[in-house]
Image (cartoon, rainbow, N blue to C red):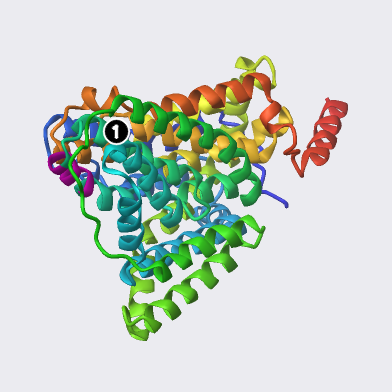
Amino acid sequence: MNENKNLKNYGAKALLPLLIFLVLYVGCGIVFTVLGTEDPFWQMPRYVAILIAILVAVIFFDKEKSVTEKVDIYCENAGKPGVMQLGLMVLMAGGFANVCSQMGGQESIVNLGISLIPSYFLIPGIFAICALISTCIGTSMGTLATMIPVAAALTQGAGLNPAMAGAAVITGSYFGDNLSMIAGTTICAVRGVGADMKGKFNVNFKLALPSAILTIIAYAILSMGSGTQAVEAGSYNLLTIIPYASTLIFALMGMDVILVLAISIVLAGVIGIAIGNISFFGWAQAVSSGMESMFWLAVFAMMISGLVGFIRYYGGIDWLVNVVTKKITGKKSCEYILLILALVLCATIVNNVMAIMILAPIAKEVGARYKINSDKLACLLDIGACVAVMIVPHGTGAMMAQEAVGATYIEILKYQFYPLFLMIFTALSIQFGSIFSKFKNKNENENESEIKNESEVV
């Protein structure tokens, strides 16, 4: 693919538009948080902040080119096939999640989980249910909104440790946000670095599963003696869970994600209409409403891709890659640095999707230099970003849980075992690498050839 190349190299100055966006969006959010303003990160909307950054890139750089020419550069990068595919995927994922919720699937998963879990195993069960729901519906926010009230009720009704219950909901909700094939974070990470969806899932699963098992064991040990009161589960219909199961099965079979989502959306409609939970037009409206809820991500993906295109065009990506590369002593240090960058950036902007979209182009270039498996790259970005939003005090999950269960942030943080185990297993996989040995990068030979050619030219 041919990309526009600028003869002028602004170096670090090319990163100014991105810095302006972060200062406007994150800086204002932090200030309004300190002031106690409601919805602090919406006072300076992300769209306006990034629009200002884009205008700075258009107006104040490369004045020899006309505004029209620079807008063409923006549009070329904003409208890349990968970005358009990402937009379609997240819109369909939103439609699927909402139609399943409207036809009773989400409620069925919650009630089925509660009915299968003994009362003395409730806190490990809360984590397991949240992990299952978030993997099926592909959104931490949907899981948090559904399960935090349930956890709060169980805390009061069954005598559970409120801080532990809150931690179980938060970490279980982000388990699926990191792993689900229809989660925005997963889609962005995979498309951003050119990975394979099934391959990324396989890599990620080998880290998430042992981490989840150890978390469940830890919760089971610490919650012994609590949860002695019986808790009644609501009704559920196994038919409404079929669309969720089909999504996971088809995706693991290697089917294209867009086709998987299309089949699952239709299947959810057919089942919902057949059991009388939704009408045809109700199905259509539910899909539309779900798609609308994801418009922000589709639009923001285009805007950030266009902005990153400017930064690349002005030499900022090359400069940043060179700076990062100087800190890298080998493949392992490269992987550690990318993981930490994802964690730090996401902790700063408190949005794992945005953090991944910003870092993906850099990770792709640096990963190619060190011949890092593309599936592994996607996994590292996704894990770093999701761990950050689990543990930061200003994250949505932490704030919702504190208010609902009546525990402080520090009390909840003490019981957040899953992100700790996940980071340990990720570090072990980087250090020893055996867990990834069978997942050879499909583009590795091409990368080796490109690196060899570059070295020959130099």
The residue wearing badge 1 is: 167
**Would residue 344 appear left or right of 25 to someone viewing this image?**
right
Q: Is residue 16 visible?
A: yes
The residue closer to the viewer here, 457 or 277, is 277
Q: Residue at x 47, y 67 (%)?
A: 243
Q: Reply yes or no: does residue 149 show up in magenta.
A: no
Residue 415's quadrant in the figure? top left
Where does the magenta region start and end?
150-157
Q: Quick check: 104 above or below 72?
A: below
Q: Quadrant of the C terminus?
A: top right
**Would residue 25 appear left or right of 188 to someone viewing this image?**
left
What amino acid does circle 1 point to? Answer: Ala
**Would residue 90 appear left or right of 124 to someone viewing this image?**
right
Q: Position of residue 376 (x, y in %)?
A: 63, 36
The residue closer to the viewer here, 237 or 300, is 237
**Would residue 416 appear left or right of 200 to someone viewing this image?**
left
